[in-house]
Amino acid sequence: MAVGPAPIPPRDGVSPRRVVLRGVVDSHHTYVAGQSGDGDFVFGETIPPGTRLSKPQPAWFYPVLDPEPTIPFQHRVVYADERIVVVDKPHFLPTTSNGRFVVNTVQTRLRREFGQDTIVPAHRLDRLTAGLVLCVRKPQDRAAYQQLFAHGKVQKWYRAEVHHPEVLAPFTDVSIPLRTVRGERQVEVGAGKRTRTTIVRGRGAWVNVYPQTGFTHQIRATLNWLGAPIIGDDTYPVSRPRPWDDFQIPLRLFACGLEFKDPFTGVLHRFRRPSTQD
């Protein structure tokens, strides 16, 4: 079932959350009715605590935020216009809320910085990956930019520092199937969605990576499969979960370039990370 719009806006950069209330309404939050064809409350109406509902009622509320670990690294705005913001995300900062982090995310930081609670990323980077993230400022523009990524119309350039670079050919086109496995941190190679990645050797242990598809851990899993796992990877080849506040060894993977034709203006955007080697 499609989720309708929220009846209340984000607050201080943090989006409200949706819940389906049943039985007696608790007093833990102030609930505002969401869209419902036959609910007891109309859209936007506050639902008093203690109310006994005759049927399930979609509702929205502002979450009470638990203290979060501090992420002691700053983002950098690379570009901004009336529709988009391009930001250089540091290692360890989530792109969007992941359960543990809500305030310490690219999305919330930019919403507060620009005073615009509608900013959302058009795509994601892993929390451990640093580099460029394209964010969209207006709700009516989101789909157009998100579709660029979904349809492979964004050229992406990454740099990675790897173990055993000597096992890699100077130029490699890799096409392998990947799939996520419930409960596992690693993705599985050999089944699932076909992915495509081009890898070009650079100086020393550095490689340039050009993914033509977008899949969870695509670059990390592909380089590991080739025998050249990325330095600082806590998932490949061996899963070693690290504490949230362990910032000692960053993943040596950087999203360095984004190139695409703007869906509204037709302008060819070429964005580069200010520092392409760390």
Image (cartoon, rainbow, N blue to C red):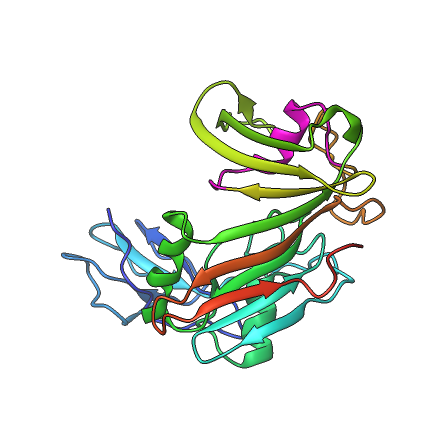
Where is residue 90? Give x, y as percent.
71, 58
At horizontal 61% and vertical 59% (from top left) the residue drawn is: 132
The quadrant where residue 241 appears = top right
| Nearer to the camera, 208 or 59 | 208
At horizontal 14% and vertical 56% (from top left) the residue drawn is: 38
| Nearer to the camera, 190 or 165 | 165
Where is residue 116? Give x, y as percent.
49, 78
At horizontal 53% and vertical 38% (from top left) the residue drawn is: 216
Task: Specify whether 123 is left or right of 232.
Answer: left
Task: Specify whether 153 is left or right of 70.
Answer: left
Quarter of the image where the C terminus is located: bottom right
The quadrant where residue 89 appears = bottom right
* Residue furthest to the top: 190
* Residue furthest to the left: 38
Where is residue 242? Give x, y as percent.
76, 38
Q: Is residue 225 magenta?
A: yes
Q: Is residue 163 above or below residue 30?
A: above
> Taking the image as drawn, is residue 99 in sight?
no
Where is residue 43? Give x, y as percent.
23, 68
Task: Specify whether 31 is left or right of 75.
Answer: left
Chain part drawn in magenta:
212-230
| Nearer to the camera, 31 or 67 | 67
> Taking the image as drawn, is residue 108 in sight?
yes
Q: Is residue 21 magenta?
A: no
At horizontal 43% and vertical 24% (from top left) the residue drawn is: 192
Q: How many marks?
A: 0
* Residue furthest to the front: 170
